[in-house]
Image: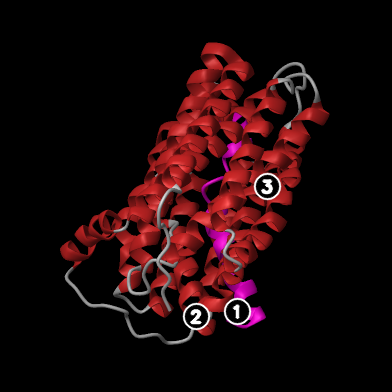
Amino acid sequence: MSRGLTFLFALAAGVAIGNLYWAQPLLGFIAGDLRAATATAGWLVTATQVGYAVGVLLLLPLGDVLDRRRFVPVMLLTSAAALLLCALAPSFGVLVALGVLGVTTISGQVLTPLAGDLAGSAHRGRIIGAVGAGTLTGILASRTIAGFVAGAAGWRTVFALAAVVAVLLAVLLHRAIPPLAPRTRMPYPQLIASVGAVVMRERAARWTLLLAATGFAAFSLFWTALTFLLSGPPFGYPVPVIGLFGLAGLAGVLSGLHGGRLHDRGWSLPATGTAWVLALGAFVVAVFAGRSVVLVIIAIMMIDVALQTQALLNRARLFALSHEARSRLNTALATGNFIGAGIGSAAATTLWSAGGWTAVTITGAALCCFALVVWALGRRGPLVIASP
């Protein structure tokens, strides 16, 4: 993994994951254009995330048995086709149905275990952290980019431009990824069934997956509800300004880079607990941020540093469990993550209708407390088995 290849992997992973979040700051914009309620528009994000979980579950395990030099570009090209369909969707109902975009957007998750394979064991955490930082940048920058582009040229242009970028990355990655023989060979039904077998075999995997899913639920709960908060009174910000708030979350990028080094030094478990304490503090700050833009920004920075650090540490611990099954372990991780994210988005929509920002932030704090209990119980005994 040269620096150039690491950067390309990080860029491609960020663009791929960003496809799931283009619509998040545009919910009010899309709802107005398609004559739907803003609360109903929130289900667009949920549909895409659930579709992504399905794609990860059914397609990502193929990374262990296929030539990834071909597999990654093919998935990027199918994402480009889905993005183009989103840009041309004639009604809100059809746009929601195009949660198929989520099914196709798995190339970033294929690249992450591939980076782990190409990196040496002494630097695996750092390389995975760099690719993870690219993923986080994509999640956050997608909101800012979507806000500016939609404000200037309409929300459909956002999806059209994303399709063009996906095609360009498909070409670059096909040229850059070195030829690698499949790590194992087995029939597709056996491959899918083996995902559960790998998880059940490793106690550390089950413990880590629960923490990871909880983290993504809290992350999605916060960011989905934040769009509703900033677009309504007392703030009333337009779409481009709402997108700018994503920049505050880029503090999590640096935490991801350092989180990889913490794993390489053997500090993964205490750092995970510390990250969850910080996340709890972020939601406590957020409770009082309903009328203060300064507190909103502080809460964004805290929650992104906390949740992205624990997410990176979760992934690095999983990849240390098995060399031959990294794509399948990543399948379990990504499926749990985005089921959690889908639950978080749906909960944000429901909680916002029931109790507004206060209900959302109290629920987020409760999720952090649950995660800390899981962490405290799960860290007892041996958790990580090193692999080459």
Residue 269 lies left or right of residue 187; in this view the side is: right
> Of circles 3 and 1, which is in front?
3
At 36% from the left and 61% from the top, the residue drawn is: 329
Q: Position of residue 288 (x, y in %)?
A: 73, 20
Q: Distance between the residues labelled 3 and 1?
A: 25 Å
Q: Where is residue 383 in the image (x, y as percent from the top left)?
A: 41, 57
For the N terminus, the image quarter is bottom right
Q: Residue 118 carries which label?
A: 2
Q: Give the range drawn in magenta.
A: 1-30
> How many C-alpha atoms fall within 10 Å of the one at disc 1: few (<14), some, or many (≥20)?
some
At 62% from the left and 45% from the top, the residue drawn is: 275
Taking depth in this image into account, of 224 and 383 the one nearest to the observer is: 383
Give the residue type at disc 1: Leu
Residue 261 in the magenta stretch? The answer is no
Are the residues flagged by discs 1 and 2 in contact, CB closer than 8 Å?
A: yes
**Chain-order first, disc 2 or disc 3:** 2
Are the residues flagged by discs 2 and 3 in contact, CB closer than 8 Å?
A: no
Residue 98 visible in the picture: no
**Chain-order first, disc 3 or disc 1:** 1
Q: Position of residue 22 (x, y in %)?
A: 58, 45
Query: What residue does disc 1 label?
Result: 5
Residue 348 visible in the picture: yes
Residue 18 in the magenta stretch? The answer is yes
Are the residues flagged by discs 3 and 1 in contact, CB closer than 8 Å?
A: no
